[in-house]
Image: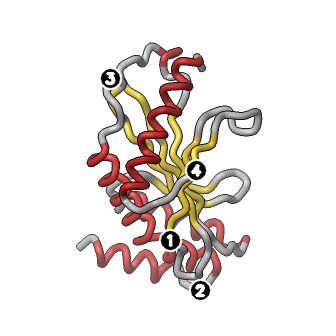
Amino acid sequence: MSESTQARDLAELGFLKQYLKEAGLQSDLIDPSDDVPIGVLLVPINQDDRERDRYLTFSFIPSLAEHGIKHIRLLQIYTKVPTIWKEENLEQVEKLLLAINCHLAIGHYSIREDGELYYRYVWCVSGSTILPKDELLEIIDVFMLMMDTFAEMIDGVASGRTELSSALSFLEKGSN
């Protein structure tokens, strides 16, 4: 990634940091390093129903210019979803995530190879303007709403507290 692209990404994340500060949220801007090669904005958010810490991370997906993409940029919003796993429930959680993803307004839930459950949205923004404050704050609100709507259900199935059939039935009732 070019130094100018990296500098622009950090500046944009700095604008986002200011937007969030004005909205009452603190955040930390993490400069690129050997461990994390891109700039990341880390935002602590409210704890989940089980009082576990949660964070949002914001970062720009690099290397679009190498593919001839010049007029848009992709801003990723990512969070790890705190989950208590019972290994035998993995298949049920995968089925639930497929069903939930059909109900989401934005983003998707998935499981990384290391077992981390996450919720992610990639927002396509214009490459010719700075991040639009009002739109970005609304995207964050919708992201949080989708996360808060489904995270407890996912954790329930993952931990074995909730039967998959009950969760799927709830989803089906909600879509009617």
The residue where tag 2 is placed is 161
x and y percentages locating residue 33 in the rendered image: 72, 34
Find out whether the residues at labels 3 and 1 contact each other: C-beta distance under 8 Å: no
Closer to the eye: label 2 or 4: 4
Q: Is residue 92 above or below residue 2?
A: below
The residue where tag 3 is placed is 128
Closer to the eye: label 1 or 2: 1
Closer to the eye: label 2 or 3: 3
Task: Kindly report the distance in space between the C-alpha atoms of the residues bearing marks 3 and 1.
Answer: 33 Å
Which residue is located at x 54 percent, y 25 percent?
7
Which residue is located at x 40 percent, y 71 percent?
149
Closer to the eye: label 1 or 4: 4
- Amino acid residing under circle 1: Asn
- The numbered mark, 1 or 2, whose residue comes first in the sequence reads 1
The residue where tag 4 is placed is 28
- The numbered mark, 3 or 1, whose residue comes first in the sequence reads 1
Q: Quadrant of residue 129?
A: top left
Q: Quadrant of residue 62?
A: top right
x and y percentages locating residue 8 in the rendered image: 48, 26
The number of numbered discs placed on residues in the rendered structure image is 4
Q: 6 left or right of 171? A: right
- The numbered mark, 3 or 4, whose residue comes first in the sequence reads 4
Closer to the eye: label 3 or 4: 4
Which residue is located at x 39 percent, y 41 percent?
123
5 vs 71, nearest the viewer? 5
For the N terminus, the quadrant is: top right
Task: Kindly report the distance in space between the C-alpha atoms of the residues bearing marks 1 and 4.
Answer: 16 Å
Task: Kindly report the distance in space between the C-alpha atoms of the residues bearing marks 1 and 2.
Answer: 23 Å
Which residue is located at x 45 percent, y 60 percent?
25
Mark carried by residue 46:
1
- Amino acid residing under circle 2: Arg
For the C terminus, the quadrant is: bottom left
